[in-house]
Image: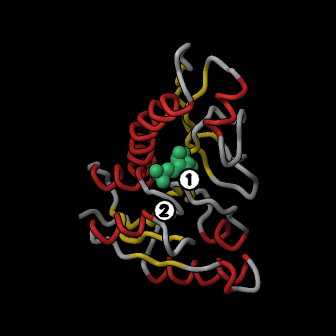
Amino acid sequence: MSNVRVAVFASGTGSNFEVMMQENLPCDIVLLVSDQAEAVVLEKAARLNVPTFTFDADDYPSKAAYEKELVEKLRAENISWIFLAGYMRLVGPALLDAFPNRIINIHPSLLPAFPGKDAIGDAFAAGVDMTGVTVHYIDEGIDTGPIIKQKEVPVLPNDTRETLQKRVQAVEYELYPEVIRKLVEEAK
Ligand code: GRF
């Protein structure tokens, strides 16, 4: 066990979360936060004995209101980093101000190209011959925060959207742990 406690935020299948749990990272994932009560990632967290916290944004009057509760929960858990892994919500000032330069995200394109929800599909449809993966700090925009590291993934002539997605994801599984390792070590 390390003494650096982190939370992962995810809304979907959680394959990046699962990879993080398998890696020997210099931090402990002690909380999985999700805004989707039915998300597959919650089953993975349960199987891996990671405590979860779910919330429904519709139960709160505003983003500020649910983020205030999240900040309280994260502080109570002594969380020092937040890793977004398929968390499909914009982060607002309440969380950003509480964790300056401590919230990072992985995105499946070479930002600033193809921000948004379907970066792989958009890159494939655009017919580019190179896409990739970006790990970046979070700000209030849609995938606009300062870039930490990128890795290219070529689009091959015979690629389908599905084969491209598989190769992009394989690079995500390498790049995110690599960046996490470096940032957490440097901050120690
Ligand atoms: C990943 O492609 C990540 O880049 C994006 O959301 C997806 C999450 O996938 N932000 P998973 O839930 O980790 O499988």
Q: In which quarter of the image is residue 147?
A: top right
Relative to residue 41, is residue 145 depicted above or below?
above
Task: Quadrant for the C terminus, please.
Answer: bottom left
Q: Residue furthest left?
A: 1
Disc 2, SS: strand
Q: How is the image coloured?
A: secondary structure
Q: Where is residue 23 in the image (x, y as percent from the top left)?
A: 29, 48
Q: Identify the mark at residue 112; answer none if there is no mark.
A: none
Crowding near the residue tagged with mark 1, few <14, some 14–19, many ≥20 C-alpha atoms within 10 Å: many
Residue at 60%, 56% in the rendered image: 101
Q: Are marks 2 and 1 in contact (CB under 8 Å)?
A: yes
Q: Position of residue 89 (x, y in %)?
A: 66, 63
Q: Identify the mark at residue 81; answer none if there is no mark.
A: 2
Q: Where is residue 114 in the image (x, y as percent from the top left)?
A: 71, 36
Q: What residue type is labelled 2?
A: Trp
**Residue under circle 1?**
104
Residue at 52%, 16% in the rendered image: 158
Marks 2 and 1, the one that precedes in the sequence: 2
Q: Quadrant of residue 108?
A: top right
Q: Position of residue 155 (x, y in %)?
A: 56, 20
Residue at 38%, 49% in the rendered image: 185
Q: State left or right for residue 34 relative to residue 113.
A: left
Front-lying residue, 161 or 147 = 161
